[in-house]
Amino acid sequence: MNLRTGNCLEANSWICGKFISTRQHELMAALGQHIELTVETVLIALAISLPLAIVVRNSRQASSGLLGVSTAIYTVPSLALFGLLVPITGLRPATVVVGLVLYSLTILVRGVLTGLATVPADVVDAARGMGMGKLRLLFTVELPLAMPSIFAGLRVATVSTVALATIGYLIGEGGLGNLIHEGLTNYFKAEVLTASVLCVVLAVVFDALIVVIQYLVTPWRRRRTT
């Protein structure tokens, strides 16, 4: 396998430096779109799931209903979901974001509900005894203690979004998925492998970034382990 010249393109090699150097702009554009889709999806899904979970957490019937609806959406095949969304949102990135947000809600809602449910009752009672109101109790006691579960759900949702975003190739808005699909269609090995590796690296980087953010925003857990 000759990687020093353009022969790897002619030989259709899996690993080809010439492909990366000649298609760098296209690779970076696809990677940028993939990052944008992932970040938008996770932020929107978190902004929706967090207040929803807080509102229904004290009602078993409401929380079960919310989980049931979000889980039902998660079971819809991505091809069918995007097919249902296209007549409403059109062939644009918003269609992919909406679909990915719907898939992420199940993971994030469950993570928030689980985290809030694990807050010790005696801690809540003690905070109320100190005169804390509902909002202060929520933001200074319950949510901080629920952070491990929330971040666990956030990590799963983010990595899942990186993977599912590739399906956006169906409408030409799949980031690295566009390149993977194009490579598979044309049996262009270097394109398939390079885009796939970038997807894996992106998922790992996002996961590591969330771990760092969790470490920074939960200093009390660091003190507990030292």
Image (cartoon, rainbow, N blue to C red):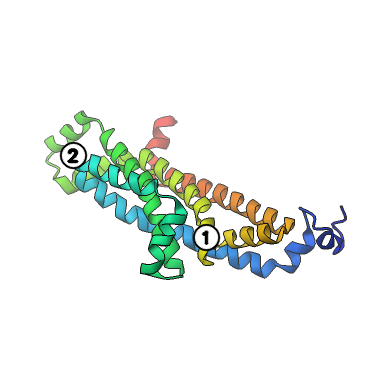
Quarter-of-image position of residue 25: bottom right
Query: Within 10 angstroms of label 2, few (less than 14), some, or many (20 or more) residues?
Result: few
Q: Residue at x 40, y 43 (%)?
A: 153
Q: Quadrant of the C terminus?
A: top left
Q: Is residue 49 left or right of residue 125?
A: right
- Whether residue 45 is visible to the viewer of this picture, yes or no, is yes
Q: Residue at x 81, y 62 (%)?
A: 9
Q: Residue at x 60, y 68 (%)?
A: 29
Between 40 and 132, the one nearer to me in the picture: 40
Q: Callout 2, which amino acid?
A: Gln
Q: Callout 1, which amino acid?
A: Ile
Query: Within 10 angstroms of label 1, few (less than 14), some, or many (20 or more) residues?
Result: many
* Whether label 1 touches label 2, CB < 8 Å: no
Q: Is residue 75 left or right of residue 142?
A: right
Between 226 and 124, the one nearer to me in the picture: 124
Mark 1 or 2, closer to the camera: 2
Lower position in the chain sequence, tag 1 or tag 2: 1
Question: Residue 17: x percent and y percent?
Answer: 78, 59
Query: Image height check: is 119 above or below 54?
Result: above
C-alpha gap between disc 1 and disc 2: 37 Å
Query: Image height check: is 50 above or below 220?
Result: below
Q: Is residue 126 left or right of residue 195?
A: left
Question: Residue 47: x percent and y percent?
Answer: 32, 56
Q: Which residue position holds label 1?
A: 35
Q: Which residue position holds label 2?
A: 61
Q: Secondary structure at mark 1?
A: helix
